[in-house]
Image: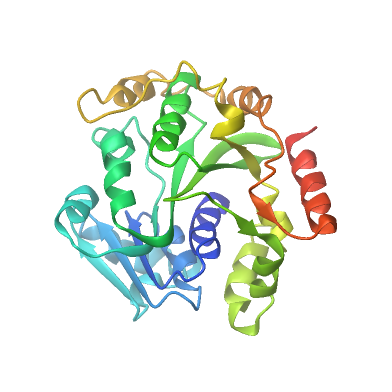
Amino acid sequence: MRLQRMLGHLTTLVPENPQRVLVIGGGAGVTAGAVSVDPLVKSETIAEIEPLVPRVVSKYFSEYNFNVVANPKVTVHLDDARHYLLTTREKFDAITSDPLDPWVKGAAMLYTKEFFETVKAHLNPGGAVTLFVQLYESNTAAVKSEIATFLEVFPGGVVWGNTNNGAGYDLVLLGQAGPTQIDVEAVQRHLSEPSMAPVARSLGEIGMYSAIDLFSNYAGMKSDLAPWLADAAINRDRNLRLQYLAGMGFNLYQSEAIYADMLQYSRWPNDLFIGSDATKQQLRAAIQKMQGK
């Protein structure tokens, strides 16, 4: 649940005005539910291919997903997410995807350069997209392929780590059409507003009690990870390389080693975070602590 809450809240906290949000895949509804409790979100669309999913999650997981299916500002659109984006003229302030395992048949098509370009084309100015990358049951080649392909389309993108007992478990990628800059103090002020209490409470339930806590999960950007990604295979519609790379990582448990290897290249991002010197020093110390440096 920590990963899904991170996905949902980063999706709405980074853009300035996340009124219209698309969630790819319903899953247990936790990602979509985290999006739905942000009061700035006025309209949320869930593109879900399986009709049973909304009924099942509303019955068994409503306690964890904020009863998202019944939320009046949420619309469930029964369709393949890729087909939906290729056939709609609608644009969004933010787009996210519930966790998808790329070794599952068909999932690799939602990690191609062409699909990311389609997602980018459906973002409003200032909009953001977030994506799950698994480290567990995966291998270095697959992880590199997912990150490098995303950063081809979103060169200013940011990698965030989700750890388990201090070790790498999975990742969240965040990208925008232009460079990403995060005003840490503005996000904290926003989280302190009475209307944002559901979001602050949701983050608190996963051990993140401030903007510093959330953004201390920073793990890297293209500028510092480029040497690590130098041999990455770009996943394209015409090769679907990731489908095979990910399949070879099934049942492997190398997440800790993959994450530790990646973090060797991570450096403090001078242009990413905005705030006073004191705030940036506090955040930098928190990042170093999370990375074990």
Query: Please, which residue is most extreme toward the bottom here?
Result: 194
Query: To which quarter of the image does residue 224 belong?
Result: top right
Instruction: Give the vertical position of 103 relative to 270 (above or below).
Output: above
Q: Quadrant of the C terminus?
A: top right
Question: Residue at the spot x=54%, y=24% of the render?
Answer: 253
Counting from the top left corner in percent of width and height, residue 64 is at: 50, 65
Total numbered labels: 0
Query: Please, which residue is most extreme toward the top here?
Result: 231
Instruction: Give the vertical position of 180 relative to 263 (above or below).
Output: below
Instruction: From the viewer's perspective, tell me whether residue 162 is left or right of residue 34.
Output: right
Counting from the top left corner in percent of width and height, residue 59 is at: 36, 68
In this view, the residue in front, 273 or 217, is 273
In this view, the residue in front, 90 or 167, is 90
Query: To which quarter of the image does residue 70 belong?
Result: bottom left
Instruction: Give the vertical position of 147 relative to 196 (above or below).
Output: above
Question: Residue at the spot x=54%, y=57% of the render?
Answer: 10
Query: Please, which residue is most extreme toward the left here?
Result: 87
In this view, the residue in front, 269 or 165, is 269
Counting from the top left corner in percent of width and height, residue 117 is at: 30, 43
Instruction: From the viewer's perspective, tell me whether residue 150 is left or right of residue 158.
Output: left
Question: Residue at the spot x=65%, y=67% of the render?
Answer: 187
Question: Residue at the spot x=44%, y=29% of the render?
Answer: 148
Query: To which quarter of the image does residue 93 belong?
Result: bottom left
Counting from the top left corner in percent of width and height, residue 226 is at: 55, 25
How is the rendered protein coloured?
A: rainbow
